[in-house]
Amino acid sequence: MARTRSLAWVGALLALGFALLALSPLTAAGRLEAAGGELLAPAARALHGLVRPVAEVALHAGQLRRLSAENARLQQDIARLEAEAAALRGAVAAYEQGAALAAAVGGAARHVQASVVVRDPTPGRRQLLIDRGAADGVVAGQPVLGPSATLVGVVVEVQPRRARVRLLRDAASAVASMGQQSRTPGTLTGDDATLRLEFVPLGAPLHVGELVVSSPLGGMLPAGLLIGRVAAVRGKPHELFATVEVDPLADDAALERVLVVTSFLPGDVGEGGGR
């Protein structure tokens, strides 16, 4: 009903406008136009009041579209800046780790820094793929060091620009080791849960808290690389060997950069394991 009345008003106004236009040449047209203007003024104001909200909504809709587009651009800029900041933080962290590794090793042995590229997700396997290989002087059997120059694994496979590292907690790992103070020898093995020093005679002078280091026996590793600390020594009277648990000094799950000791060649038993 309201819409019908509005259409009728608009039709009447249009008809009156055409009538005034047709009568404009007449002498009395001026008075008629004035009278018509006074008559139509309320209707014109009412029509303006109806049209104005619609015009404002259209104007605001355009502004909202522009603001929405500008907001989307700003969100893209923020995402790009956050990505760049994250990359920069990663580069700084990698540089700091590399500097700390190099400082821990010093100039005693030649080495190359490498970044961890891939971690092997296979259950029971603790292996890494690093971004250094034969082109960088890496050969199978070389020790791989982590924070504070602690032994974390051994190179087991080499490609021109890549190498695979078997970590100490890999189920297939076996490293000749010994107590640093007692010089008690054993074989360090591991799994996902812990490290163990095996073939330690029952009653050997190995004690809890003693550091465990690499042994040069067999020429497979240089002597004296820090590995871990004895956490527990247990054994039963009828057994030949004690059960020795070792806590590693480095968390291999947090490794991002490592050092490969390229001056060592497997089978080299010279001083410090180098040539």
Image (spheres, rainbow, N blue to C red):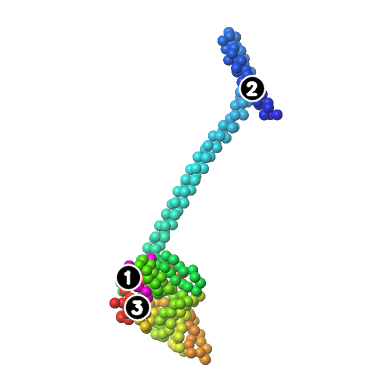
In the picture, the quarter occupied by the C terminus is bottom left
Side of 147 where 54 appears, left or right: right
Residue at 59% x, 32% y: name it: 53
Residue at 32% x, 70% y: name it: 137
Query: Distance of mark 3 from mark 2, alpha carbons?
Result: 103 Å
Secondary structure under the numbered disc 2 in the rendered image: helix
Whole-percent x, y for residue 229 in the image:
44, 78
Secondary structure under the numbered disc 3 in the rendered image: loop
Q: How many other residues sit within 10 Å of disc 1, few (<14), some (14-19) or many (≥20)? A: some
Residue at 46% x, 51% y: name it: 79
Q: Residue furthest bottom?
A: 238
**Residue 218 visible:** yes
User: Mark 3 or mark 2: which comes first in sequence?
Assistant: 2
Query: What residue sits right under mark 3 in the picture?
Result: 266
The residues colored magenta run 131-141
Q: Quick check: 24 above or below 86?
A: above
Disc 3 vs disc 1: Cβ atoms closer than 8 Å?
no
Residue type indicated by callout 3: Pro
Q: Mainly helix, strand or loop, the magenta region?
A: loop
Q: How many other residues sit within 10 Å of disc 3, few (<14), some (14-19) or many (≥20)? A: some
User: Mark 3 or mark 1: which comes first in sequence?
Assistant: 1
Q: Which mark is residue 11?
A: 2
Q: Residue furthest left?
A: 275
Query: What residue sits right under mark 1 in the picture?
Result: 137
Whole-percent x, y for residue 223 in the image:
36, 80
